[in-house]
Image (spheres, grey):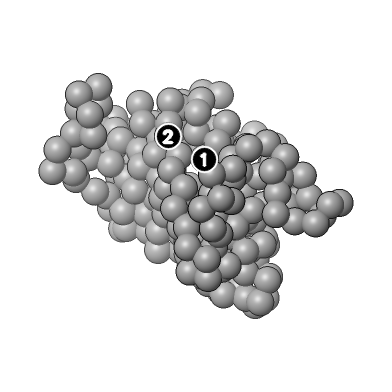
Amino acid sequence: SELRVIDARRVLLDLHNTLSGIVRDNVKLVIDVEERLGHIRADTNQLEQVLVNLAINACHAMPDGGTLTVQARNVELDAPLSKHHAMRRYVFLQVSDTGQGMDAATADRVFEPFFTTKPPGQGTGLGLAIVYGIVQQFLGQIDVESEVGRGTHFTGRRPLSSETATAQVREPRSLSLPTTPTAARLRVLIMD
């Protein structure tokens, strides 16, 4: 994968049609992106892969319908995250749903490859493992937070870049779409 400075707002808005094709009629899609969202260093295709997998996961967590929300905001922290990461300015990205949520025992295993809460033959349990793998490539961290019956939140944090976004030539690609995502509330931290 190749990291470039990208216009995260444009990527998220461009992804609207893809996400619209994923959600069922009984799921409302809301994309709420800050007007002056900062630029970040990322791989556009992999960012899209993460968002699509999280959206599919969210839809499976809402069999009776609900709301899938993608939000992005600029955030300035009061203090650096750690002595190794002096950055204070980030883009926060959150994918939320109003689905089923999960218990703590499920949350502990949610990123294990082939772990699924679906009946046998109804999925592979690779959706969140794919997300985890992509995030780990960027030296990221994923925390799981969930409450049964309270829905799902996936929150990512990526340092703002002071560089100008570079134009990316979009090559045809296929996204690896999991057939059985697991309901979860996740916090996705992607840090340099």
Quarter location, residue 90: top left
Q: Type of residue at label 2?
A: Gln
Q: Which is more toward the observer, 107 or 45? A: 107
Q: Nearer the viewer, mark 2 or mark 1?
A: 2
Distance, label 2 to label 1, CA atoms, is: 15 Å
Is 22 located above or below residue 166 in the figure?
below
Element at badge 2? strand
Q: Quadrant of residue 101?
A: bottom right
Residue ID at (77%, 44%): 124
Q: Position of residue 46 (x, y in %)?
A: 56, 36
Element type at marker 1?
helix
At 22% from the left edge and 40% from the top edge, which residue is drawn? 89
For residue 122, side relative to residue 117 (left or right): right
Residue 182, relative to residue 190: is it above or below? below
Judged left or right of residue 124, residue 94 is: left
Other-residue count near label 1 (Cα within 10 Å), few / some / many at <14 / 14–19 / ≥20 = some
Q: Is residue 119 visible?
A: yes
Estimate the x, y position of residue 154 in percent, counting from the top left: 46, 52
* Residue 79, quarter of the rendered image: top left
* Residues at marks 2 and 1 touching, judged by CB atoms closer than 8 Å: no
Residue where numbered disc 1 is placed: 47
Which residue is the site of mark 2? Answer: 141
Q: Earlier in the sequence, mark 2 or mark 1?
A: 1
Q: Residue at x 86, y 51 (%)?
A: 121
Residue at image x 78%, y 50%? Answer: 123
- View extreme (left): residue: 78
Residue 52 appearing in the image = no
Q: Position of residue 3 (x, y in %)?
A: 46, 26
Q: As shown in the figure, which amino acid type bears the numbered disc 1?
A: Leu
Tell me where residue 183 appears, x and y as whole percent. Answer: 60, 57
